[in-house]
Image: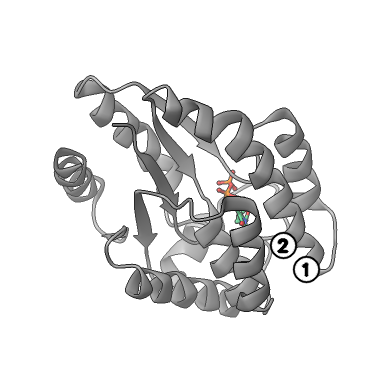
Amino acid sequence: MSKFITLEGVDGAGKSTHIPTIANLLRAQGKEVLVTREPGGTPLGEKLRALLLHEAMHPETETMLMFAARREHLEQVIKPALARGVYVLSDRFTDATFAYQCGGRGVSADKVRQLETWVQDSFQPDLTLLFDVPIAVSTQRLAGARDPDRFERENGEFFERIRQAYLARATDFPQRFRIIDSGKTLKEITKKLEEIVLSI
Ligand code: TYD
């Protein structure tokens, strides 16, 4: 049985570093793995990503474009891969909309739930790895980044709200969330990821 696994966390939490590790751990178990990302993952989705990361827009426009990209991603990439028995690892999914657009920008969670039902019906990740780190640490990591996008340019309070919104999602959906303490060393995190992958 294939699985849909999503990776979440504030910008600078380090999830991008760990995605190849998770993919390799799964491949070592003989699974076929597809790594993808949101917003993006399809040709149209990548065009929407460029707009989302660089054009000023209303927070609800931002929310709807996230779901527009997601609609394509689900139909063209995620669901067909799962149907072929492939494990799909997505760098962000709908929890990011609840965290960034609701927690960060103040968009109504009810509206986002309506879009979620519209676009996904009852489809949800099988497993969500939340890379959690204090905002003081993630912003320090981001400070080295060249050419920050619209999200990365936001202040610490914005990211603190996002972090809390992610943690609240993890509390609400304990059966699918695993929280990874991203402040730990690379070696410790890799060990934790090995445990999680073995338990899948
Ligand atoms: P990110 O994974 O951080 O890309 P990169 O590591 O290449 O910078 O994703 C881009 C941004 O999109 C990130 O700041 C979070 C934001 N985002 C949302 O605000 N809502 C969403 O639903 C998704 C999927 C992403």
Q: Which amino acid does the dot numbered 2 rest on?
A: Thr
Residue 149 sits above or below residue 49 on the image: below
> Is residue 155 in sight in this rendering?
no
* Ligand 1 within 8 Å of the CB at mark 2: yes
Q: Nearer the viewer, residue 97 or 163?
A: 97
Per the image, the residue denoted by label 1 is: 60
Location of residue 86 by image quarter: top left
Q: Nearer the viewer, residue 70 or 26?
A: 70
Q: Nearer the viewer, residue 60 or 74?
A: 74
Per the image, the residue denoted by label 2 is: 63
Residues tagged 2 and 1 counted as in contact (Cβ below 8 A): yes
Label 2 neighbour load within 10 Å: few <14, some 14-19, many 20+: many
* Ligand 1 within 8 Å of the CB at mark 1: no
Location of residue 49 by image quarter: top right
Q: Nearer the viewer, residue 4 or 19?
A: 4
> Is residue 140 in sight in this rendering?
yes
Secondary element under disc 1, as helix, strand or loop, is helix
Residue 200 sits above or below residue 128 on the image: above
Secondary element under disc 2, as helix, strand or loop, is helix
Which part of the image, by quadrant, shows the N terminus?
top left
Q: Position of residue 21 (x, y in %)?
A: 31, 34
Give the residue drawn at x 23%, y 52%: 185
Q: Which amino acid does the dot numbered 1 rest on?
A: Glu
Q: Position of residue 171 (x, y in %)?
A: 33, 75
Label 1 neighbour load within 10 Å: few <14, some 14-19, many 20+: some
Q: Position of residue 150 (x, y in %)?
A: 73, 58
Location of residue 72 by image quarter: top right
Q: Give the spatial CA distance, label 2 vs label 1.
A: 5 Å
Q: Position of residue 92 (x, y in %)?
A: 51, 50
Give the residue drawn at x 42%, y 71%: 169
Give the residue drawn at x 31%, y 58%: 176
